[in-house]
Amino acid sequence: MTTHSEIHDDLSFEDSYNFAYLDEQTKRMIRRALLKAVAIPGYQVPFASREMPMPYGWGTGGVQVTAACLVPDDCVKVIDQGADDTTNAVSIRSFFERTAGVATTEKTTDASLIQTRHRIPETPLTEDQILVYQVPIPEPLRFLEPRETETRKMHALTEYGLMHVKLYEDISQHGHIATSYAYPVKVDDRYIMDPSPIPKFDNPKMDDCPALQLFGAGREQRIYAIPPYSKVKSLDFDDYPFSQLRAPETCAICGADDSYLDEMIIDDDGGRMFVCSDTDFCASRQNEQGFEPAEVAS
Amino acid sequence: MTPLFSVNNITKYYGSQIGCAGASFDIYPGEVLGIVGESGSGKSTLLNCISDQLSFDEGHIFFDMQDRGFCNLANLTEPERRMLSRTDMAFVHQNPRDGLRMTVSAGGNIGERLMNTGARHYGNIRTAAAEWMERVELAAGRIDDRPSTFSGGMQQRLQIARNLVTAPRLIFMDEPTGGLDVSVQAKLLDLLRGLVQQLGLAVVVVTHDLAVVRMLADRMMVMQKGHVVETGLADQVLDDPQHPYTQLLVSSVLQV
């Protein structure tokens, strides 16, 4: 006779989860929302977001979308502000290693699914890849019109003048469009969409992108998508066209002059350096140049 | 000559209570209609019904549209009705806070209707906003200030500019001078009268202030308990009221 504790000992911790943590009915529900989102590019599809074993704001929406998309031979990469080695990225990556047993990688080119918080990788994506964004606030009109009933109507009737009021305010106060992240875009000439808080430097990468781009907002219970090769246009005025923004420096480690840079404070005397925010991009450039990979202090 | 706007037998019930019953009138271009009555007489209900902010139970509203002529507003689709309410029609609220975006600068407030109807050139929008600031006697230098830094009278003038920038042909006003002191009221009425004459606007103005009607309106309607009890030329009704309630209303005005 086997005791309860013996059964429990037989099962490894990993085995006690369904593949990719979520139960099959939940994944089915999320996939239905994803299909609808792909069919109507930029439209926010409501879905029954589940409680996840992490707080809201840590990527509960992205994790659910990733879980619903994963198959056993997927290779997952997770980035947080471009970096593979930050808390959020490491813990979500180990979450899927543990609950789905899938391979993980830090190399953009090796990944079949990339979950991201606030960046798009510098390395161009391919048709074989899915990019999953973590979205805090999916409604681009939220801070202009607080009523959800009204914003839905505005989306339905394509009444988007208000979005330009925000850009007008930017120019009147700062002399240029000062919005530098979460810069609103129009997808497929129809819906205005919040691209999640990516820097506007990344906005042009969404346009005509070969990869499928999926957006999950867990707390707000919304999923939306940009199908491959869709038209994504950043909003602007005729006399104030959209422009990218990056620090006018080169990466202090790899010397890249075309990547998005993080500013790091390195001492108490105002010393600073600029380095690539995309750690994989920076590391692969270092390899090409024959640098040894940077030692990690233990 | 067809009327610009025709209201036919509008009736609105709140449960078993009558909001307003059987109100009908026509408005021609350039004409100002005053609707007066005490609190609870149904004048605001009627105004909200005819300005597409409240659904009503019976009756029809017709508008002489620029592209398709005289037609029943009930036959328009919702996008068409909403487009109409921000191009050919406008609504001036009693409290400017209801009609303005308090967190957006004065220029943005005036420009919103332009951007809503497709304007995408910052320079042109700003020029139009500055022009309208001057027309309603606001200093153009305050174009980047938020309405929350404006006085009540200035906010009301800003609300009027914001509504007139797309050159509407019909304006609804709900107590436009309510809550303003008398000298500011007089200035605002002066401004409104000038704009109405210059632009040939048709206006429906709801008020309990008979002085506003006397100054502004060509014709007036008196409402009591949801019913229209008297209509006629404004001067005629005010100088020779026929209905007992109108007589009471006119005789209640304080003579200073």
Image (tube, coloured by chain):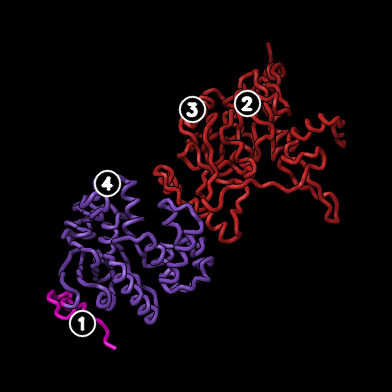
Q: Distance between the residues labelled 1 and 4?
A: 44 Å
Q: Which of B254 and B114 is in front in this view?
A: B114
Chain of the residue that carries numbered disc 4 in the rendered image:
B
* On screen, residue A90 above or below A169: above
Amino acid type indicated by mark 3: Leu
Amino acid type indicated by mark 1: Ser
- The C terminus of chain B: image quadrant: bottom left
**Chain coloured red here:** A
Residue at left 29%, top 57%? B51
Q: Nearer the viewer, residue A252 or A103?
A: A252
Q: Distance between the residues labelled 3 and 2?
A: 20 Å
Residue designated by label 1: B251
Q: Which quarter of the picture shows residue B87?
A: bottom left
Residue designated by label 4: B76
Q: What element carries label 2?
A: loop
| Residue contact at pointers 3 and 2, CB within 8 angstroms | no
Q: What element carries label 4?
A: loop
For this orientation, the residue located farthest to the top is A1
User: Could you tell whether A5 is left or right of A230 in the image?
Assistant: right
Residue at left 46%, top 73%? B138
Q: What stretch is highlighted in magenta?
A: B236-256
| Residue A44 percent coordinates (x, y) | 49, 38
| Residue B63 percent coordinates (x, y) | 23, 55
Q: Which quarter of the picture shows residue A123?
A: top right
Residue designated by label 2: A126
Q: How far apart are marks 2 and 4 (CA)?
A: 46 Å
Residue at left 61%, top 59%? A174
Q: Which of B90 and B35 is in front in this view?
A: B90
Amino acid type indicated by mark 2: Thr
